[in-house]
Image (cartoon, rainbow, N blue to C red):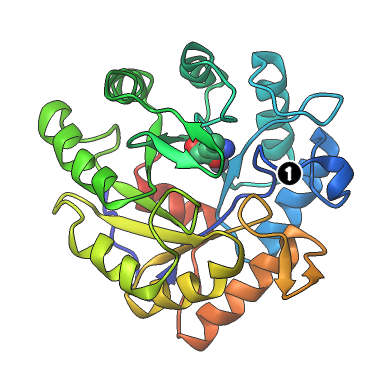
Amino acid sequence: MTTDLPADRLLITVAPTGAETAKEDCPQLPTTPEEIARTAAECEAAGAAMIHIHVRDADHRPTLDLGLLREWVAAVRDVSSLVVQLSTGGSVHDPLEDRLKVLDAEPDSCSLTMGTTNFGDDVFSNPWPFVCELYQLSQERQVVPEFELFDLGQVHALHRLLAKYGLPYGGRVHCDLVMGVPGGMNGTADALVAAVRDLPEAVTSWSATGIGRSTLAVALASLSKGGHLRVGMEDVLTIAKGVPVESNRQLVERVAELGRIAQRTPMTPDEARTFLGIR
Ligand code: KMH
Ligand code: ZN
């Protein structure tokens, strides 16, 4: 099987919900199976090929309940062909053992953060033994990881992980630079260039997302370095200063347009499966 696609292809990942924003503060945040299904269909039509999912319960609170994880995965698969990536990061309050169980919901892909990060006033905990256990579990379950890199130290940790445990299931190595988190690397072109320069040679693709007001700076820097894009209401809630985002579709449409200007064509979900080594 060849994994080569035309060089202009752009992987757009939508991260529509996250675990940090309350429904009461942002009613347009998709927090039910119906809302996530509608979001998936709209974002696929707008150019997204992968969806990064954090699940909410009936009270709109973040949860790692296996039944709900399965329900959300099924809801997205019913209405779209998007590559389904479940977050194993969860919320800063989720125990490590619950985060390992996310793979029981049989996603196509899972996020895998390469180290502990201060996360605003909280700590997003990813001790090295946990990272290694989750990685080996993803290999065993044939789930393709996306390595989330919040700082340069985590880029270095990815070198160590691949040297110790080899390539992920599928043989491709895809990373996502998560930039602008208070506690992680800055959301600037300079920081992006430094992180990309240090990526392991085994990396076959990378995307980037800038939190909050760094969203556009990071998207433009990523396009100019030939990278891919993640966008969504997990990462940004305003479309311009003081103007709330209306929907995830609006954010996907905007980066698809930036991609068009940069002469990049959105990848289809089928192309993304090949590109990422999804089974
Ligand atoms: N919600 C953050 C604490 C991931 O999805 O893997 C972690 C996060 C990363 O969003
Ligand atoms: Zn996430």
Residue 168 image offset from top left, x and y in percent:
27, 34
Q: Residue at x 33, y 66 (%)?
A: 191
Q: Quadrant of ligand 2?
A: top right
Q: Is residue 85 visible?
A: no
Residue lying farthest to the bottom in this orientation: 261
Residue 232 image offset from top left, x and y in percent:
64, 56
Looking at the image, which is closer to me, 108 or 29?
29
Residue bearing the label numbered 1: 21
Q: Is residue 11 above or below residue 40?
A: below
Residue lying farthest to the front in this orientation: 121
Q: Residue at x 71, y 49 (%)?
A: 40
Residue 5 lies in quadrant: bottom left
Q: Residue at x 19, y 64 (%)?
A: 197
Looking at the image, which is closer to me, 221 or 253?
221
Residue 117 lies in quadrant: top left
Residue 211 lies in quadrant: bottom right
Q: Residue at x 60, y 80 (%)?
A: 257
Element carrying mark 1? loop
Residue type at mark 1: give it: Thr
Assign the C terminus to one quadrant of the image: top left
Q: Is residue 168 left or right of residue 118?
A: left
